[in-house]
Amino acid sequence: MGFEKSGDIFVRFCFTRTLDRKTTLARISELHPTITDIYKNMSDTELERHCSPLVLSTCKRAFLVPVRPGYAISLINSSQSANDLFGGDIRVLLRWDNVYYRKKTRHRMIQAPAQILWYVSRDIKKIVAVSWLDDVEIGGPKELFKKFKKSGVLEWKDIYEMCDGDVSKEIMALKFSHTLPLREQISLSQLQNIMEKNQAALQLQSVSELPPKVFRELLQLGYPD
């Protein structure tokens, strides 16, 4: 979960900002000087994960992932997400690592490591949370469900419906972690404005890659000053 030991205590930093590496390390030094050397030796990706939802100004890959309200993230505080994002299962709420299943679409484009913004569709139409995408696996529904049964946020009936009852169809398992709710949920109109301003195409029917500049702007909107 990103904690590091310092003497008799464990420390974790949580920066809701886009910062460069030098500034991040300087802030860590101000907050807890004796632990700074540990973070200096981390790669950019490790530093981001240990201080999530920190985004370094060098971030390279991020995705917008649409989910239906019925699956929405109770991984996220339900009072903040207002809509039970992944089912309200207490076992999901207590997990740091999770798996979300999708149809096998745009699978060549979706690569880890990356960061995810979760967009709740239908009557919600808001981005509600940010996560780290750790890995992507493709395989048969039965195979993936058996492998990730303890980590998945969908039941077998949901996966069966997803593949239209044809269990020979391959699906995708998105392995993600470090899920945190946004302080301010981002509306569809706000998302559209930022995409238009940056001349980026908006696609909400499936997973889409976000230009790094757009991702940073959206994250800052979700965690305002």
Image: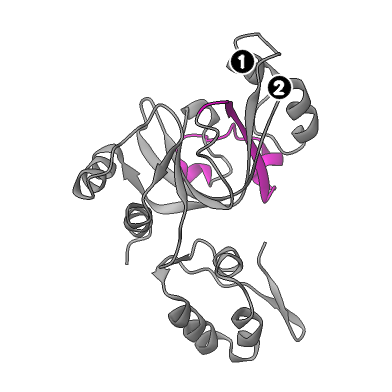
Q: Secondary structure at mark 2?
A: helix
Nearest the eye: 150 or 102: 102
Disc 1 to disc 2, how far (Cα)? 8 Å
Residue 159 sits above or below residue 134 on the image:
above
Q: Secondary structure at mark 1?
A: loop
Q: Relative to 196, is 162 on the left or the right?
A: right
Name the disc covering residue 141, or none. Answer: 2
Sort mark 1 into few (<14), some (14-19) or many (20+) by Cα contacts within 10 Å.
some
Q: Is residue 104 magenta?
A: yes
Name the disc covering residue 219, or none. Answer: none
Residue 136: x %, y % from top left: 63, 40
Sort mark 2 into few (<14), some (14-19) or many (20+) by Cα contacts within 10 Å.
many
Which residue is depicted at the point 60% across and 71% down?
43
Q: In the picture, which quadrant includes the C terminus?
A: bottom left
Q: Is residue 14 magenta?
A: no
Residue 154: x %, y % from top left: 65, 28
Which residue is depicted at the point 47% across and 77% down?
21
Question: What's under tag 2, amino acid-wise?
Answer: Pro
Instruction: Examine the image and state in which quarter residue 165 appears.
Output: top right
Residue 10: x %, y % from top left: 71, 76
Which residue matches tag 1?
A: 163
Instruction: Examine the image and state in which quarter residue 145 appears.
Output: top right
Range shown magenta: 77-105
Nearest the eye: 30 or 165: 165
Which residue is depicted at the point 54% across and 36% down?
108
Nearest the eye: 14 or 107: 107
Q: Could you tell me if the residues under marks 1 and 2 are in contact, i.e. CB atoms within 8 Å?
A: yes
